[in-house]
Image (tube, rainbow, N blue to C red):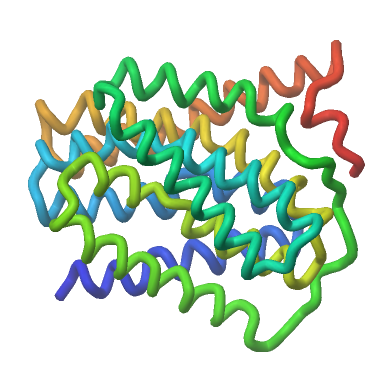
């Protein structure tokens, strides 16, 4: 019962915070925050609590691998949404995610392989997005935020319910399915148009370095420690990784152009 309450509350609250941050500071910041393990992290922790730490460790490795699936979804959506409405863009992008997941599931599910594949994808992906810009101001609606939160809660319940039947590899891959990114992308596309979608996703790439760091710590700590010890160490690791990414980004913007610095403010 306690886990059910957490599932129904943690992810919707995170979606609310990130959505409000996006309204206050723009889609790029919302995208960056959505790249943190704010949804995939809790889901994987729920899975480990229910299925055991060995299961959770393998799921965490698969979650790292799934970063490439998530980036494939983002790139596909950034291009498709320029010509298609959100239902078809969502369907086709999800098919791209599924195809990438099926391919990656055939690779050795080890930490070195997962990290190597994900870091390569993180470096290459910013050059593959469709052109983006800030776009028109978001349309405000009384129903907007509760609908986002309800969507996130429903997806969380579905994914954790499937985990026990899928094994650790697919549990980890699906746990890192872009729930919050999907919610943010859909509502950004609907309320602001296709332009800001790529802008949001570029921020998401930066945040995903923290995602990789978080799950890497879980992989190394859970086999030798407790559930909470892994989480306690993984959270500061995620923030430390983001501090490094932002420092590197600052240096790059200062000395030479990058995909991020070319975005129109």
Residue at 78 percent of width and 31 percent of height? 260
Q: Taking 121 as reference, is 140 left or right?
A: right
Quadrant assignment, res 211: top left
Which residue is nearer to you in this view: 99 or 14? Answer: 99
Quarter of the C terminus within the rendering: top right
Find the residue positioned furthest to the top.
Answer: 255
Give the residue drawn at x 39%, y 21%.
115
What is the quadrant of residue 218 in the picture? top left
Q: Is residue 135 above or below residue 228?
A: below
Question: 123 left or right of 216?
Answer: right
Residue 15 sits above or below residue 258 on the image: below
Is residue 75 toward the left or the right of residue 7 in the image?
Answer: right
Q: Residue at x 67, y 67 (%)?
A: 86
Give residue 244's quadrant in the image.
Answer: top right
Which part of the image, by quadrant, shows the N terminus? bottom left
* Rendering coords of residue 84 (x, y %): 75, 63
The x and y percentages for residue 192 are 81, 66
Q: Is residue 185 above or below residue 147?
A: above
Place of residue 98 in the rendered image (x, y in percent of width and height, measured from the top left): 43, 48
Residue 29 vs residue 55: left or right?
right
Residue 25 visible to the viewer: no
In this orientation, does residue 99 appear?
Answer: yes
């Amino acid at each position: 019962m306690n886990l059910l309450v957490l599932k129904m509350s943690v992810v919707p609250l995170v979606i609310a915070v990130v959505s409000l941050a996006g309204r206050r500071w723009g889609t790029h910041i919302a995208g960056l925050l959505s790249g943190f393990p704010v949804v995939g992290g809790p889901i994987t922790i729920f899975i480990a609590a229910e299925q055991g730490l060995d299961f959770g460790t393998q799921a965490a490795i698969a979650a790292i691998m799934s970063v490439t699936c998530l980036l494939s979804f983002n790139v596909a959506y950034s291009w498709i949404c320029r010509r298609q409405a959100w239902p078809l863009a969502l369907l086709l992008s999800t098919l791209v995610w599924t195809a990438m997941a099926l391919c990656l599931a055939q690779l050795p599910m080890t930490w070195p392989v997962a990290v190597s594949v994900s870091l390569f994808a993180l470096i290459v992906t910013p050059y593959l997005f469709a052109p983006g810009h800030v776009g028109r101001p978001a349309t405000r609606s009384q129903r907007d935020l509760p609908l986002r939160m309800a969507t996130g809660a429903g997806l969380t319940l579905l994914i954790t319910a499937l985990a026990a039947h899928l094994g650790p590899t697919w549990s980890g891959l699906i746990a890192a399915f872009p729930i919050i990114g999907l919610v943010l992308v859909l509502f950004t596309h609907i309320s602001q148009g296709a332009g800001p979608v790529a802008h949001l996703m570029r921020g998401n790439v930066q945040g995903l370095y923290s995602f990789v760091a978080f799950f890497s710590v879980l992989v190394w700590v859970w086999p030798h420690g407790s559930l909470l010890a892994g989480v306690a160490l993984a959270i500061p690791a995620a923030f430390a990784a983001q501090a490094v990414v932002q420092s590197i980004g600052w240096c790059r913007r200062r000395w030479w152009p990058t995909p991020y610095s070319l975005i129109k403010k």
